[in-house]
Image: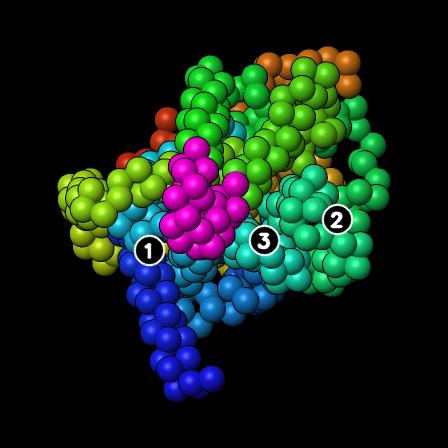
Amino acid sequence: MNWRKLNFYSISKLYKIGFEVLAITALLCVLQLLDENMSRSNEIDILPLAKQYANPNWIPGDWYLNQSPGYRFIFQILIGNLILAWGFLATSIVGRILCYCLIALGLVLIKRKLGLSLPLLLLVVFLFMTSQSFAAGELIISGLQPKVLSYGFVLLAVRAMLGRSYYWMALMLGLATSFHVLVGGWSFLILLVLLILRWNTCRMNFRCFGGIVLIYLIASSFSVKAVLEQLFSPNPESSIPTSYIYVFLRLPHHLNPLSWSSLWWIKLITYLVVLIITAILLRRIQQKSATNQKSIYESSEQYIARMRLFDFTIISLIPFILGIAVAPFDSNGSFLQYYPFRVGSVILPLNTYLLFACLLEQIFVEKKRQLLLFGSILLLSFLMTKPSITFKNQLLSLSQFPGAMQRVSLEEKSLSAWIRGNTSRDAIVISPPGSFDSFSWLTERPTIAKFRLFPQNKLGIFEWYQRMRDLSGNNPSILPVISKELKVKTKGFGLPKMLDSGYYSLTTAQVNFLMSKYQTDYFVTNVKHQLNLPIVYRNPQYLIYYKVKYSNPT
C-alpha cells in the first residue's frame, strides 16, 4: 500500500471538507450572524441565565435568573464564563459562528454522502433559511442557544446513520440530548424506529442495537436529572395544570395546532408530494443506471443513502402526526408540552430540498450538469444581494449596541443607566410584564417577571403565572383562574399586550400592594400612567415611581 498517496488523498479530502464547511458557515453568517443578537431571539432569555449561573452575584435577587439550569446545564457552564470574559455581544457572535460551523459540518458530510455538489447545497441552505419549518415555528438555525448545538449533533448523527456508523450515531444523539433533551430525544426515537423498521437493510443485530442504546444513555447522561424532575416532580396544588399554562397560554405558536396559520397543512402536503415524487424519480434513475452498468457501486451507495434519508424524513413525521391526532383531546397539554411537532416540522423541508437537489444533479448530466451548477451560482449570487446589504447595515449598527437592532430605545437605555447609578444592587424594580424584555441585563437589577422569560420547571411555571396575574391586576379577562374543565381560547402572542394593558391600568393601591408583596420601592411605567406616588425619574417614554413608606393612598 502506498501510504504517501493515501495520506495525500486524506489531507486533500480534509481540505475540501474544510473549504465546504467554511463556505456554508459564511453563507449562514451573512444570513443570520448579526440578526437580533440579544433581541427577539432566545438569546435575550438564555444568555443572561448563563451569565447568572456563572456568576451568582451578578443579579442575586432576580427570581427568574436564579432558576435551576435544568437541561441547559452544559450550555450555561460553557457559555456563562465566555459572557463574563467577553460580554453579551461578543459571546453571541462567536457562539453563533461556532454553532453554524457545527451545522455546516453536518450538512457538508451529509451532502458528500448523498453525492451533492457544493453550489446546489449552498442554494438548498439559502432556500431552507427563508422558511425553516412548515408549522410550529421551529428553527434549526437561529441565535446562540442549546437547541442549535443540539441540531448540529443531530445532523452529524444522520450522516453517521447514512454511513452505517451506528455507534457514532448514538454518541452524536446522546450529545444532542445533553444539550437539548427534546431535540435529541425525539431524534433518537425517530432514528431508533428507522433502524427497527429497516433492520435487515441497515444490517442491524441485537448486539449492535444494545450498544447503540448504551452509548446513547451514557452520552445523554447530563439530561437525566432534567428528565426525572419533569416526569416525577409533583405538580403545584392549583386548579390550573402547569402543562396548560405552558401549552395554551405561553407557547401555543409552537404547541397548539389551533393557533397556527391555516396554511400549514397546505405546506405539509406540498412538501410531502415533492418528496415522494422525488424519491420515485430517483428510484427510476437508479434502475436505469444499474441496467447500464455505469458506476454501479458509487451510484448504489448514493442511492441507498438517499433512500435512507427519505425514510428518516417520513418517520420524523410520526410524532408530528401523533401530536395532531392527540391535540383535540389533550385539553391540559399533557402530551403536547413535549413538542411532538418540533423535529418533523424542520426535517421535512430540509430533506425535501436536499433530495430534490440530488434529483436535479441526476437529471442534468455531463455538460448540462455544468450549466446547472453555473446557474445555481448565478441564482444564489442574485438572491444574496439583499441579505448582503442587510448584513452590512447590521455590521455598522454594532457600534450602537444595545440599540435599535436589539429593540432598545434611547429612553430605555437612559432609564437603565439611571437605575444602575441611583439604586442599590439588590433593589428590586417592578417593570412591565409584556415588554422591555431587556430590563434585567440592561439595568443589572432584579425585576418581578417577564412574559418572555419563562421557567422550565413546574413550580417555576406556576409562580410565573401568579406573577403575571399580579402584574396585570389579577384581571380575569387577561389571565383567569382556570379549572381543569374550563377551556379558554389560546392567548399566545397577543397576551403580552394584554398584560401590559392591565399593568398600565393598575391603581395606586394595587401598586402599593405589589411593592409590599415583592419588597420593592420602585415601579417603572409609561408616562401616561398617573399614580399618587412621588416620581424619582422621568423621560419622554417612562416614569419611575417611588414607594411612600407610611402613605394612605386613594
Which of labels 3 and 2 is toward the front? 3
Residue 472: % across, % down = 56, 26
In the image, residue 54 above or below residue 441: below
Checking the image for residue 227, the label placed there is: 2
**Circles 3, 2 touching at the beta carbon (< 8 Å):** no
Q: Amino acid at mark 2?
A: Val
Q: CA distance from mark 3 to mark 2?
A: 26 Å
Please say whether residue 380 is one of the residues in the magenta stretch.
Answer: no
Q: Which of the two residues, 247 or 117, is positioned nearer the viewer here? A: 117
Q: Residue at x 65, y 32 (%)?
A: 319
Question: Which mark sits nearer the N-terminus, 1 or 2?
Answer: 1
Q: Is residue 289 left or right of residue 309?
A: left
Q: Secondary structure at mark 3?
A: helix
Q: Nearer the viewer, mark 1 or mark 3?
A: 3
Is-magenta flag for residue 290? yes
Depth check: 364 or 409 in front? 364
- Secondary structure of the residue carrying numbered label 2: helix
Q: Residue at x 73, y 40 (%)?
A: 458
Q: Is residue 349 left or right of residue 248?
A: left
The correct choice, above or below, for 98 with respect to 196 in the image is: below
Disc 3 marks which amino acid? Met
Q: Residue furthest front?
A: 292
| Residue 98 - label | none
Q: Determine crowd level at label 1: few under 14, some 14-19, many 20+ residues with C-alpha closer than 10 A.
A: many
Residue 142 % position (x, y): 42, 47
Task: Find disc 1 in the rendering and name its residue.
Answer: 24
Q: Main secondary structure of the magenta part?
A: helix
The mark lying in front, picked from 1 and 2, is 1
- Distance from the alpha carbon under mark 1 to that under mark 2: 34 Å
**Residue pointed to by mark 3:** 161
Residue 518 can be seen, yes or no: no
Give the magenta range. 284-307
